[in-house]
Image: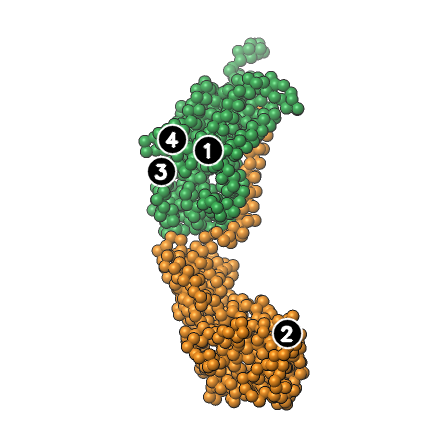
Chain colours: A green, B orange
Amino acid sequence: MSVVTNTTTIGAIELPSRRNTELVLLGFAVAIPVFAYLNVGLALDGTVPPGMLGYGLGLGLMAGIAHIVVRKFAKYADPLLLPLATLLNGLGLVLIWRLDQSPRLLARSDFSPQATNQLMYSALGIALFVGVLLIMKDHRILQRFTYISMVASLVLLLLPIVPGLGADVFGAKIWIRVGGFSIQPGEFAKIVIAVFFSGYLMVKRDALALASRRFMGLYLPRGRDLGPILTIWAMSLLVLIFENDLGTSLLFFGMFVIMLYVATERTSWIVIGLLMSAGGAVVVASFAGHVQARVNAWIDPFVCRETSVACDQMTQVLMSFGAGGTLGTGLGQGNSDLIQFAANSDFIFATVGEELGLAGVMAFLLLYGLIIERGIRTALAARDPFGKLFAIGLSGAFALQVFVVAGGVMGLIPLTGMTMPFLAAGGSSVIANWALIGILIRISDTARRPAPAPAPNPDAEMTQVVRP
Amino acid sequence: MNKPLRRIAIFCGLLVLALMIRDNWLQYVRADELNTHKFNRRVQIERYAYERGNIIVDGKPITGSVLTNDTDFKYKRTYVDGPMWAPVTGYASQAYDANQIEKLEDGILSGNDDRLFFDRTMAMFTGDKKKGGNVVTTLNGKAQRAAFEGLGDKKGAVAAIDPRTGKILALASTPSYDPSTFAGYSGKDEKSWIALEKDKDKPKLNRALREIYPPGSTFKVLTAAAALEHGVVTDIDAPTDTPEPYIIPLSRTPMKNQHGGCEKASLNEALRVSCNSVFANLGDKVGRDKMVETAQKFGFNNPEIDTPVRAAASVYDTKMDAGGNAQSAIGQFNTATTPLQMAMVTAAIANDGKLMKPYMIDQLEAPNLDVLQKTEPEEMNRPLSEKNAQLLQQMMENVVKKGTGSNAAIDGVTVGGKTGTAQHGVGNSKRPYAWFISYAKTDEGSPVAVAVVVEDSSGTARDDISGGGLAAPIAKKVMQAVLDSKE
């Protein structure tokens, strides 16, 4: 005699968790950088580099730990995000190590090898990634911290201006120095501010979307709703003016406009956002000398170089890309170290361009594109508005950062001092981006988790045919 | 919220697409432009990154490479007998780029030429170091040494050609420079470069190819060729109708002669004693346009004589009046020529009227000595008929046997030549140029034709400056060297 306990027609469909897919992909994500490392060693010295085993084991171990944590604590998470981040991080380490070997850079007083530090920062990044997954069982907890996040992000952003704490490095005041470490608070502020935007917009989206007046085909918001937008706008301008940080201000404002648009579904916000950023750009460009210099260097670096040494770096970057051609010179065989200062941080993408060529750059852009689109997929799949906004905010910021950095380095847009996520040497960037991936994985896990099996329906029992 | 999300997804896709398009633009479309940009240090770095191939004379390299401890330039160029070979090799400097063969054949020498792709790929698999290929020249070491030492501390140039093929056998220019002294980029290199730049004697100038001089009386062989070719003279021993004194057309100035006996002198005799009046008269009779035609057949007014190092264009004015033409016919007025051009004129006469294209790169070799490219002798033009060429040979041999060119005579060998003393400067105030052109002949045709110019012969009394006295002995040594090396 069988007892039917559940007669609901739709049962829980167990989605495949895809954890094994992730494991296989991670295998590739570790193997490719190890071979790249070998490649650099052979190209430079003709011998197998002594650190290869340690490097391979280190990367493998980090990837393994991350995988186990995801398997245990975020079973349904997107299987692509972790391998993609691991691959980029691993290749970034190889590129940094490759530039460490350059006699031309080692001869400079302001250069010190960065690969070991970067490996340590990557480990810290993975630790933070693991921490995010362990501590944050559900991303919706963050909703509670909406206004605390606002304060926190403001503090983070403004820290570099604080006298004694901020460090001015070649004109850009985006670092703070604590103990022996320098931190770029802007990288962390990126995530914290996304929490604030998501929480705030989730609550205010109806007011922002509906309470508006129609003017020339645009829905203009009410004055009191416009307040926060103006605040963000002003803040991004302040960052630009006081910290000389074109990238961060562009990133924040862009992220905010994207999230506003998603929350309200009103195109007018995009128009307003574009107008405001254009206005801000004009104001800043007419007052701030360094922005003008950047624009001059962008219009024609070779002409600009005649008068200003500062433009020489941009010409070096362009010539790096040119030297790469279609297939590149091969890892370790280019001269991207001619870029000198910041060759391994802001300009590391030029090394990709020179040594891996057009093919390599395309591959890297696809890897970044995949991370971005997986993030947007997560936003699409998320079932709660907070998660949707949070995921799109983070992916949008990631996309903007990639565009601004790569576009700047390739001369598509004026140069801004930001780092290529995962590739560039720099602790804050790697750690913050691992946290970002951790959060996206957490949201995707929640989004893809199958709906809990419906509770047995007592009524179903009641309507059973009466048994003899 | 999904509709705006999808739009954002498209927007992000467009951002990445924009980066990709930009990258294609940068790395594919603009790659060549960026790679050859004058600010691009990679060109220099690449040039010296590997052991550079060598320029070879008589099977021996006249260049070399030494390992340096530099981070940018791993190797530095060295030169064997730098000053002697500088007009051939040019220089390759880490600071001051390169010129002549070093620059023109940079692809082969640095190993970056497409023709070396296979070698590069093989080297990649076998683990060999990348190496440059070699440039094998047509030059003759002995002839070059004779020319360079013959010029000594005088200012001048020598060009010698094998008339049968057009192979350049010697190319000397003095004062010269040692390209080794500024091959690097240190302060010392800079100092020697600046000193060379400032030197009033212009040691870096390749006089054999790049400087044009009034050819003086040596040009008379060309006027004689024009007169024979255009039928103005048919019998070289028949008297001409030249009066004494001969008045330059459209003027009242008589044409001066160094010797007597030029009145009605035959062509043969006029060349032997170098009568100005006879040749001015002949030039006038042939006429400007026909003179231009013949001169151009020999290579005058051609700005593209590439050996492959490009020679300066020799000039025979195409627009002057009859007076100018008459003076030009004796190598004065606007007429100016490179030593190479005069060697070509001599070579064409010695080769029975066939002018071969001059060249100095015999073949290009891959690092494994495979021949990548071999230059085949090429006929450039036929400025005069075989019969007329032989008549001219007869006259030029006469000059050496019994005339002004006796200093070039070599025992047991037929030698033809012509002297020249070219006036220049306002009112002929400057020291004249001493010229000599000649060829030697054996049973197998002529193996060598030489042109020598001595610019300013310090230490020689002005009256003693003559092509026969100063330039002919140098030409003789060069011819002797070529003849010796044939045996």
* Amino acid tagged 2: Val
| Pointer 1 residue | A245
Q: Quadrant of residue B279?
A: bottom right
- B71 shown above or below B358: above
In terms of sequence position, does the residue under pointer 3 or pointer 4 come before the other? 3
* Amino acid tagged 3: Asn
Q: CA distance from mark 2 to mark 3?
A: 77 Å
- B7 shown above or below A115: above
Residue A172 location, x and y as percent? 43, 35
Q: Crowdedness of circle 4 by 10 Å Cα count: few (<14), some, many (20+)?
A: many
- Same-chain status of marks 2 and 3: no
- Same-chain status of marks 2 and 1: no
Residue A271 location, x and y as percent? 60, 28
**SS at badge 4:** strand
Q: Crowdedness of circle 1 by 10 Å Cα count: few (<14), some, many (20+)?
A: many
In terms of sequence position, does the residue under pointer 1 or pointer 4 come before the other? 4
**SS at badge 3:** helix
Eye-nearest disc, 2 or 1? 2
Q: CA distance from mark 3 to mark 4?
A: 21 Å
| Pointer 2 residue | B292
Q: CA distance from mark 1 to mark 4?
A: 13 Å
